[in-house]
Image (cartoon, rainbow, N blue to C red):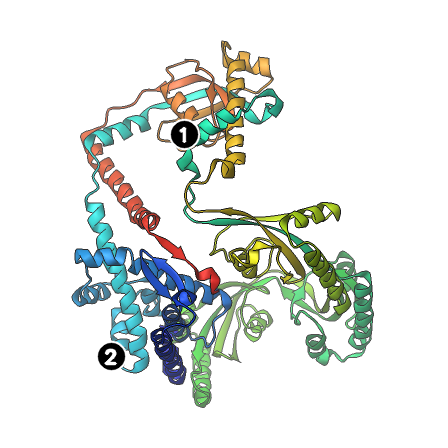
Amino acid sequence: MAALQSIRSRGKLIAICVGGALLAFVLGDFINSGATIFGASQTKIGDINGTSIDYNEFMSKVEQRETFMKVATGRSTLDAQTTDEIRDYCWEQAVRENTIGKFLEKQGIKATDDELAYMISNGNVTPFMRQAFADPETGVFNPARATAYVSQNNAESRFIWQTLENELRESREYVKYISMVSSGLYVTTKEVEHEFKNRTHISDFKYVALPISEVKDEEINVTDAALKNYYSDHKNAFLRTQETRDVAYVSFDIIPSKEDSAAIKESVEKIKVGLKDIATSEVKDFINSRSSIPYNDYHYSKGEIQNSTLDSLVFSELPGFVYGPYVEGEYYRLARVIDFKNLPDSVKASHILLAITSPNDSLKVRAKADSLMGVLKSGIDFGALAYAYSEDPGSKRDSGNLGWITESTPFIPEFKNACFDTEKGKTTLIKSSYGYHIIKVTDKTTIKRKATVGFVSVEIRPSKQTRSAAYVKASEFSGKNRTNAAFEKAITDENLIRRIAPNLTSNTRQIPGIENSRELVRWAFDDEKSKEVSQIMEFGDRYLVAALVGVHKKGVPSFEAVKPSVTALVSNSLKGDKLVEKLQGQQSVEAASSAFNKPVQEAHAVNFEMYQIPGIGNEPAVIAAAAALQSNQLSAPIKGNNAVYLLQNTSYTPSQEIQPLSITTDRKQMQNDLRYRASYQIGGAINQLVNLDDRRVKFF
């Protein structure tokens, strides 16, 4: 609700944003209706089951969603990540509208106004609506707050409420569909009995494992016929649900040179002179005007300062002592000892907040705070007053208790300093940007001597000359090597490092290790630009030159495209066969252990319903074999995913007969599990059937 309260003060913002969104919609319609001299495909952002999604119409919805998020969260601007998330949300909404949305409409599945009203009255609402209209004291959704908001009946509240109501309606219609499907899912008595039998059939066993990785490649013969047979039998295992692309790239990192470092050190030496001479009262402003990292008013105990030399000197020097410059991470640093204090590591405190909502209320609130301070002196319980008068909903419910506070606790400095400076058992009054705080310190840890140290941190950055030299090198590489063949040859000839960004999709937002890498993804999916090696791209402190080295179309790939993967799988299978032959004829687990110098290991309480065995992992063949072994029985060699195993049962508990009462409870649990899986698998199944042409990468 706090976020929505900001709407009242943002009437102009909402008018501008809504107006802008409407203008974009009107202009988009005008542009579309004016028929396109460039062709409709120029503004086509995608196609969903034959429905064309136009860029201008899509962006109109994005802008409306951005307007909603700005007003609902009280922000005037949105960061890049939020904007990306909004675009993704609007695209997914378009997919829903043109897939399951059309199906629901055809089936007549709707959420009526009466249904929505009932859901709101019972608190069965979307997470955003629940958060927006939660009671500040309990955190529970309060229907009355929602009703009060709607009753304002102005442009702002109507806009916000309509958005929230549309989300609730869409959610309700989808839930009704899921419920309809789930109602058709049933677990038979035979299924319940079968599951119970598998679950209560328990085995302990000892085993020896021969890792497949220990067989050398030259010990097996992988033929093309075997590879093609495997591919033919397992084609669907390689199915791609969307197109992916592989990009190889060379990075020309912009690293500060020795000359850059020396120049920065020289500038820091000059700062050091000023840091020594500046008055203590001016140190904070001096540091903030020259340091890459702002001043931090932290009190250090001995052993807390990262630089061990500085840590050993601080407590033997007087205030005004300056140390450095020294290198720490990517910075040259200077340190000045400011003062010493005897302080605890942490304090336990409670408070009463009297908020100032308007500058004109300051004197009135101060008078109320003074009055409460007087009441406390008369012996009234602090917690009772906090519960009755505090306007901090978080601590109010716990009688004002804030728990233990350390120097790292993210409280405003004036509040935190007051907590540390106040004696145990005493009460103090301070003013902050939030209002007046009545603070009671209830406990403190042991007092220690601590030092306040101010740090000047100057980042060791590459100079323009260094940046220019890296650019020239990258430019020369890109200019000389325009084809993939030349690109690969130059990497070898110049002994450069070839990196790979595999399996990029058109919606990949971030490539690991590359800052703000969306530009590289867009280049990879630009069929014209990616025909040849890229021009220079800049990402943070590096220049990249890239080549598109793989395009993997949606659907079942060709044999050649997956041959490396097929080869690895067939090789592992042949290696497993070789180990099976070696284990044949072993009379016991101990004999196999002695013959192959492998330890005898144990597994306990294994049943057929398990997903993996502790110490072994996900080995379905081992689970199946273990469940079938009788008491003290030795298995045949079992070829698993990672090793070949020989098992011997050490304890066997046969499956139990299920009781009638358990049939009822187990059936209910199994049906709940089945319906839960259906609730999230339906969406994925629908999307797999969608004829989807997503072209967003061409626009952003």
Q: Residue at x 20, y 62 (%)?
A: 111
Which circle marks residue 151 in the picture?
A: 2
Q: Nearer the viewer, residue 653 or 522?
A: 522
Residue 273 in the image, given as x and y percentages of width and height: 82, 75
For the residues labelled 2 and 1, say whether their Cβ atoms are less than 8 Å apart: no
Q: Residue at x 22, y 50 (%)?
A: 179
Image side of residue 105 versus residue 280, left or right: left
Residue 61 in the image, given as x and y percentages of width and height: 36, 70
Residue 543 in the image, given as x and y percentages of width and height: 67, 60
Q: Marks 2 and 1, Cα distance to the nearest angstrom? A: 64 Å
Q: Give the foreground label among 2 and 1.
A: 1
Q: Which residue is mark 1?
A: 233
From where the camera sits, is residue 246 visible?
A: yes
**What amino acid is at disc 2?**
Ser
**What amino acid is at disc 1?**
Asp
Q: Nearer the viewer, residue 216 or 553?
A: 553
Secondary structure under tag 2 reads loop
